[in-house]
Image: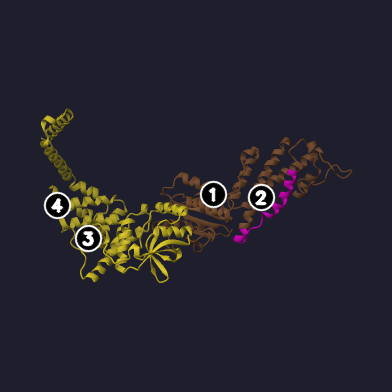
Amino acid sequence: MTSSYVVLDRSWHGYAEEAKEYFSSVCGLPKSRFLIETPVSSDLGYSPTLHVTTREQTLLCVDVVSSYTETLDTFVLGCINSGMPVELFLAVPVDSPAAMKDIRRAAQSGIGILEVGGSTPLIIRPAVSLSLASVGRPKLKEYPPKYRPAVEKALQTFLGSDPPSGALLLYQEIEDLIRRLATEVDRKGFWKALPPGKASPGLRWDKDPWQNVSESLVKHLDSQKLACPQLTLPLLGRVLGLADHRNLVGHKPKTLKARIKRDREIRPRFEHAAETLRDLLDAARPLKL
Amino acid sequence: MATAHTTPAEATLAQIDVAKIDRNPDNPRIHFRQGELEQLLDSINRYGVQVPISVYREGRRYVLIDGERRWRCALKLGLETIPSLVQAKPSPLENLLLMFNIHALREQWDLLTQALKLRPIETMIEVAEGRKPNERELATRTGLSRATIRRCNLLLTMPERYLSMILAELEKPKAKQKFTEDFFIEMERSLRAVQRNMPELIQDEREKDSIRRVLIDKYKTDIIQSRIHFRKISKIARATRVEADPQKAEKVLRDLFSKNSYSIERAYDDSVSEAYVERDVVTRIESLIKRLHELDPADIDEDVRVHLKSLINEAQLLLERGA
């Protein structure tokens, strides 16, 4: 057993070592990489019991505690404000007085809970990267029932280990909807401002690039004939703007700095995509796509 | 406390770099309750360190005298400095006595920690004053009670390997500690009672140690379920006090110290249990009779009258059944 812990009470060192063993195995990182009671960054003075930088450039922090404290709120707020990609787990002994309200409070802040001191460590709740935790959560009731599982899955993927894939799930839903919309408009011939002699922009709506399909709708859709008053030019313009974002989500950050930048950029994009999907579904409702 | 240490008036107040402070080597085994530490952390996070810690200078660094919890919280919160009273460096004996008076009493050192620290204190006082301090003097100097010093001395009479066993146990969370100081104290006391009352059962240290092993194994396997049960060993050893058969008592103790599955409870039931119940009943009856003698018949109300009649009936029935 290591004796590097200064702040944590000696009788609790076993819990910290148990948590270290667990995360070392889960993350595939040697135990020697874990820093003990060291500040996460110079801006955030707080020293969790353990922390380590993972391969995904996440700062995985473990704090061995008996309950949720106000000080943790300060730390969480600091992480959110500085955009640090911290995933904080509270390692709570199985026989500690931490009550359900502590767990609920931690969960609301995006903090994970690891139960230690039992037969094996157990994740009671996964942690969310605090750089993403403040993302505006889509209100599921604002989406048609058919789409709610997809939106929820996108949010969970975003808050979980893979925010780009979370955003991508939303982009895919928007793309699918736009392609079906264009197919329907083309079937009914509700186009305008086409070159003389042409009845259709002439794209393969299910195969051609999404950006081209969106551009055609912006340029040629006759929304008055379509009887969808909310399917406005600005809304279609928003969809067109998403095409660029979609192309940027796939790059894996290689440094902590790049990870902070990526998280700072992807959070508003996710919110924007969720709002656009909601508005698009609402506007296209009369078409029953 | 009779030391020549700096008084608070002589100490200087300064903001000291938290990273330049070290723990006091003579205060090595403090246990803090995690919940209390978290409460203090919240308080310091909100209001800062309101009461200065005490330190002494050691070269370019400082050593803690008082305020380890505040210092730990400052480290955790990443505070750069902490308000500190800088005192003169104490002598080794002063330092040890300071640790006892500040920490052992206020922050509940483990008993073994106190016991291990008592040894150097005794030696230092002996060197300084030419004679070993007695129990009362040691109590005065350290601030411990004489009972605690006796418990410490009892622990120190055990072989080193048992002290190591306690130290290893102290590393575990409280709820998982089994072989605690209290366990060993109860066991040692019971063995002392056996030695005193039935010396033929434990004739030397070697024999005593082999009995310890058997009892520890039984506790490990839950044949002895509670450390309190050791008190019953003492009662069996004192069988003659309750006019129980001493030969029977000796036999069950021999079995207890050799047979792996024989529990203290069973040994007690097989030997002196009835005698102790009987003595208990007699003592209570004697006490009741004495009390009844003090009563004025004129003061007896209906409730007491009913209970007395019930007592007479019960006693009568018991005597008739036993006749």
* Residue placed under numbered mark 3 in the picture: B208
Identify the amino acid type marked 3.
Answer: Lys
Residue at (44, 45) in percent of width and height? A99
Residue B247 is marked as 4
Structural distance between the alpha carbons of marks 4 and 2: 88 Å
Residue B169 is marked as none
- Quarter containing the C terminus of chain B: top left
Task: Note the chain letter of the yellow one.
Answer: B
In the image, residue A235 lies in the stretch drawn in magenta: yes
The local secondary structure at tag 1 comes to loop
- Span shown in magenta: A234-259
Identify the amino acid type marked 4.
Answer: Gln
- Judge if badges 3 and 4 mark residues of a common chain: yes
| Chain letter of disc 1 in the image | A
Colour used to depict chain A in the structure image: brown
The nearer-to-camera label among 3 and 1 is: 1
Structural distance between the alpha carbons of marks 1 and 2: 20 Å
Structural distance between the alpha carbons of marks 2 and 3: 76 Å
In screen coordinates, is A156 left or right of B57?
A: right
| Chain letter of disc 3 in the image | B
The local secondary structure at tag 3 comes to helix
The nearer-to-camera label among 4 and 2 is: 2
Asked if one can make out residue A176 in the rendered structure from this viewpoint, the answer is yes
Q: Are marks 4 and 2 in contact (CB under 8 Å)?
A: no
The nearer-to-camera label among 3 and 4 is: 3
**Outermost residue, right side:** A197
Q: Judge whether B80 appears above or below A282 on screen.
A: below
Residue A269 is marked as 2
